[in-house]
Amino acid sequence: MKWSVFWRKDESGLPTRRHTLLVARNVLTGEVKYFIANRVPGEVNPVTGERVTVRWLLRVAFGRWSIENVFREGKEELGLDHWEVRGWRCVHRHFFLTQLSHLFCARMRSEFNASPDTSVRVTLEGVRSAINVWLDTQDLCPRCRCQRLADEAAHQQYHATRNEQARQSHRKTRVSTLTSLGIDVTPIKSCLDPRPPT
């Protein structure tokens, strides 16, 4: 990762305020990504009052994936792409309702994954699927409802276990690949925000 401070020119060719060019290369694929930031390491962030660091700039730059993931989940799982409306206010209502559904599913997922008695993590797709089964079974007899919910729980457990096995396998493979390249992963610091204490 390299970075440099530069000044962009305006329409008249005069320099504007300082910017930062960040160049990051993926050591596994060789892919190079370029980011331009309107903040410079060392200056004070006017919003937080803290000094801007390169790590903070990288966290913002690579935070795009999580934002794209929210839109993907919204489109695939919650109907964000099913506009079927004509007015701007209706589009806003649909977007807000979809995001409220996303927030609900994310909170349910977070509460389940924070439980100390669970060994596997549930996905947002799993929460949505479980809620759909619960809603579909409200008009069934109690025995049928219990059977459908038990089937869904078994289905969720199966996929959660498989996902956890895949996650562990991918992590081992990635660590061994990085080690073979001469990169020790233990001292590498994360660009992500530290998790708040629970």
Image (tube, rainbow, N blue to C red):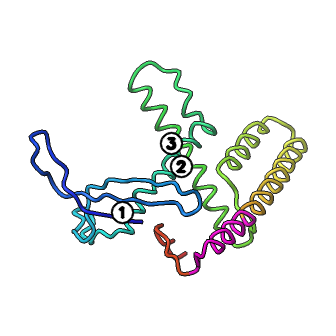
Q: How many marks?
A: 3
Contact, mark 1 vs mark 2 (Cβ under 8 Å)? no
Front in this rendered view, residue 147 or 140: 147
How many residues crowd around disc 3 within 10 Å: few (fewer than 14), some, or many (20 or more)?
A: some
How many residues crowd around disc 2 within 10 Å: few (fewer than 14), some, or many (20 or more)?
A: few
Q: Earlier in the sequence, mark 3 or mark 1?
A: 1
Where residue 28 sits: x, y (%)? 59, 61
Which residues fall within the magenta stretch?
168-186
Q: Which image quadrant is residue 144 in?
A: top right
Question: Could you tell me which quadrant the N terminus lies in?
Answer: bottom left
Mark 1 — residue?
A: 57
Where residue 128 sits: x, y (%)? 67, 44
Q: Residue at x 55, y 75 (%)?
A: 198
Contact, mark 3 vs mark 2 (Cβ under 8 Å)? yes
Give the residue type that dot 1 points to. Leu
Mark 3 — residue?
A: 99
Horizontal placement of 25 versus 102: left or right? left
Residue at the limit of the structure toward the bottom, as seen here? 187
Dominant secondary structure (helix, strand or loop) of the stretch shown in magenta: helix
Is 126 magenta? The answer is: no
Query: Secondary structure under badge 1?
Result: helix
Query: Secondary structure under badge 3?
Result: helix
Is 172 magenta? The answer is: yes
Give the residue type that dot 2 points to. Leu
Q: Residue at x 56, y 43 (%)?
A: 101
Q: Spatial distance from mark 3 to mark 2, Cα to Cα?
A: 6 Å
Q: Which image quadrant is residue 48 in?
A: bottom left
Q: Spatial distance from mark 1 to mark 2, Cα to Cα?
A: 26 Å
Q: Spatial distance from mark 3 to mark 1, Cα to Cα?
A: 27 Å
Where residue 14 sits: x, y (%)? 9, 48
